[in-house]
């Protein structure tokens, strides 16, 4: 049996007080709606439909970056969760099997819970994910009759007695895709909010002689985000989970509370992460690598046994080969650093290729930008770049070549050559002493 995913992501998120649609706010460096999608992917869906509305272009672009095949439909007017699901009807045409509806603003519903939800479909036509709420507040309430779910009543429409029910609706629903659409045809907007409620499919199913039931999960998995305070609280939870996961996978975080992860960070076994490290999106670190304190990494790859930092910045497009060393106050961008190559102190290496075992001295700069265009620098294997060398790109330094300290390299350096490119030194005997004596005399005169 195949499964389809429907992710509701059309809402504005008024309480975020933002120009950005709620589901585009970031959690773990990734748009909020992608988290539910990530968990849903464990069901191996044959089709995924994202229902966008507010900021639909932004949502669509973010979705396509993840999966070019995904279907994004637009709900022009937000007439309720039931209406939102109906927008996926055409896109689900021909799907044989279940549809699972997830909310784009609810990031923590886990894979195991979703598996139980789908499994429960063996016992009922409609399965809803519920939870025992510590404070049921304004959640929809599940009206159970034994194991059967009779209906879901929204807080706004509930009687005082119904409001005492603590078993609440998470919003997640699973039913046969075609059946779900037929049930939604039977849902009206005759309620306190004047909306088409997705949870009303339960009552319609029962009225049509179908069955409904609920499976439950921990309340923490149903946490929805509506405000910035809730977003940062979710970020805190996300970070705790990511740190635990990294250590379960065999990495050592010396001070886990100070390491910041992204949703897609991958850290290999026996990698060591020292305190105060930020993994922005797109980072993979292979086993045995060491990321030293106060380093910031983004969209880059660190191979086995490489050492980064302390105080290093790896920007997008950085690739460190095995055993490469990037030291303090070094910035690398869009550059491949060869096996065992070293850039240990105070350097900028951008738009460059550095050969294996090359050594870049302190203060080496690739001058990659002429104010209009970016140019590449190529440094050969085992080349030695003297401290404070300016490499004015485009430029190539050959294998085993050398540049002298303080060189400004504007022409290619052949393999094995030494490039000397600096003003020649002139010594004036006694001039320093005379010079300072003159300055002091000048100051004494002025001081009167
Ligand atoms: C919904 C449920 C409620 C449940 C609660 C759990 C309904 C009617 N009520 O209420 O039973 O306890 O979630 O958090 O479903 N959306 C659209 N298009 C729309 C309306 C909503 O895409 O027209 C999206 C929203 O962006 C959001 C999700 O659906 O991601 C839920 O909508 P929301 O308005 O938050 O529903 P609640 O009132 O919280
Ligand atoms: Mg909500």
Image: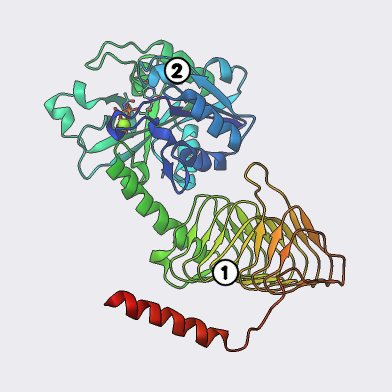
Please determine whether, in this image, residue 287 is positioned above or below residue 1.
below
Report how many numbered discs are placed on residues in the image: 2
Q: Quadrant of residue 71?
A: top right
Ranked by sequence position, the earlier of labels 2 and 1 is 2
Question: Dot 1, crowdedness within 10 Å: few (<14), some or many (≥20)?
Answer: many
The tag on residue 346 is 1
**Drawn side of residue 178 relative to residue 229, left or right:** right
Residue at position x 59%, y 52% in the image:
299
Residue at position x 74%, y 65% in the image:
338
**Residue indicated by mark 2:** 75
**Is residue 99 something that shows in the picture?**
no
**Looking at this view, is 205 or 222 the one in front?**
222
**Drawn side of residue 9 relative to residue 360, left or right:** left
Q: Quarter of the picture for ligand 2? A: top left
The tag on residue 29 is none
Residue 331: x %, y % from top left:
58, 61
The CB of the residue at mark 1 lies under 8 Å from ligand 1: no
**Is residue 193 something that shows in the picture?**
yes
Residue 432: x %, y % from top left:
54, 84
- Mark 2 falls on what kind of element? loop
Residue 68: x %, y % from top left:
64, 31
Instruction: Determine whether label 2 and label 1 are within 8 Å by CB.
Output: no
Residue 30: x %, y % from top left:
48, 43
Residue at position x 47%, y 13% in the image:
182
The CB of the residue at mark 2 lies under 8 Å from ligand 1: yes
Please determine whether, in this image, residue 246 is positioned above or below residue 32.
below
Residue depth check, mark 2 versus mark 1: number of the one nearer the observer: 1
Cα separation, mark 2 vs mark 1, equals: 52 Å
**Looking at this view, is 295 or 127 the one in front?**
295
Q: Quadrant of residue 154?
A: top left
Quadrant where the C terminus sits is bottom left
Please determine whether, in this image, residue 39 is positioned above or below residue 95.
below
């Amino acid at each position: 049996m195949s499964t389809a995913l429907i992710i509701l992501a059309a809402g504005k998120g008024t309480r975020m007080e933002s120009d950005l649609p709620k589901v585009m706010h970031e959690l773990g460096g990734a748009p909020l709606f992608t988290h539910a999608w990530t968990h849903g992917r464990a069901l191996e869906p044959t089709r995924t439909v994202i229902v966008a509305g507010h900021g639909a272009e932004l949502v669509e672009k973010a979705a396509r970056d993840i999966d070019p095949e995904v279907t994004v439909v637009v709900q022009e007017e937000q007439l309720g969760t039931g209406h939102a699901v109906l927008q996926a009807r055409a896109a689900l045409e021909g799907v044989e099997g279940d549809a699972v509806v997830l909310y784009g603003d609810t990031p923590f519903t886990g894979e195991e819970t979703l598996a139980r939800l789908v499994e429960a479909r063996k016992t009922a036509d409609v399965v809803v994910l519920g939870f025992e709420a510590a404070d049921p507040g304004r959640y929809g309430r599940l009206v159970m009759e034994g194991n059967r779910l009779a209906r879901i009543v929204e807080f706004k429409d509930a009687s005082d007695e119904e409001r005492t029910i603590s078993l609440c609706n998470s919003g997640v629903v699973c039913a046969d895709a075609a059946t779900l659409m037929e049930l939604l045809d039977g849902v009206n907007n005759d309620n306190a909010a004047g909306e088409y409620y997705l949870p009303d499919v339960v009552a319609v199913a029962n009225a049509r002689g179908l069955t409904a039931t609920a499976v439950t999960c921990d309340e923490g998995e149903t946490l929805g985000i509506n405000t910035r305070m809730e977003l940062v609280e979710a970020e805190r939870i996300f970070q705790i989970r990511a740190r635990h996961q990294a250590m379960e996978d065999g990495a050592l975080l010396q001070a886990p509370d100070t390491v910041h992860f992204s949703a897609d960070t991958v850290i290999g076994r026996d990698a060591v992460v020292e305190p105060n490290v930020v993994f922005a999106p797109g980072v993979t670190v292979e086993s045995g690598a060491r990321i030293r304190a106060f380093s910031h990494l983004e969209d880059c790859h660190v191979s086995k046994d490489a050492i980064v930092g302390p105080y290093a910045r790896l920007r997008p497009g950085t690739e460190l080969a095995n055993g490469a060393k990037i030291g303090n106050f070094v910035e690398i961008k869009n550059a491949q650093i060869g096996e065992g190559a070293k850039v240990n102190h105070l350097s900028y290496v951008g738009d460059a290729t550095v050969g294996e075992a090359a050594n870049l001295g302190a203060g080496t700069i690739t001058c990659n930008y002429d104010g209009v265009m970016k140019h590449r620098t190529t440094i050969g294997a085992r080349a030695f770049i003297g401290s404070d060398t300016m490499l004015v790109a485009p430029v190539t330094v050959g294998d085993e070549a050398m540049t002298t300290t303080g060189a400004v390299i504007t022409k290619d350096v052949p393999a094995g050559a030494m490039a000397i490119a600096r003003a020649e030194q002139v010594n004036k005997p006694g001039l320093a002493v005379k010079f300072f004596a003159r300055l002091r005399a000048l100051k004494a005169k002025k001081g009167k």
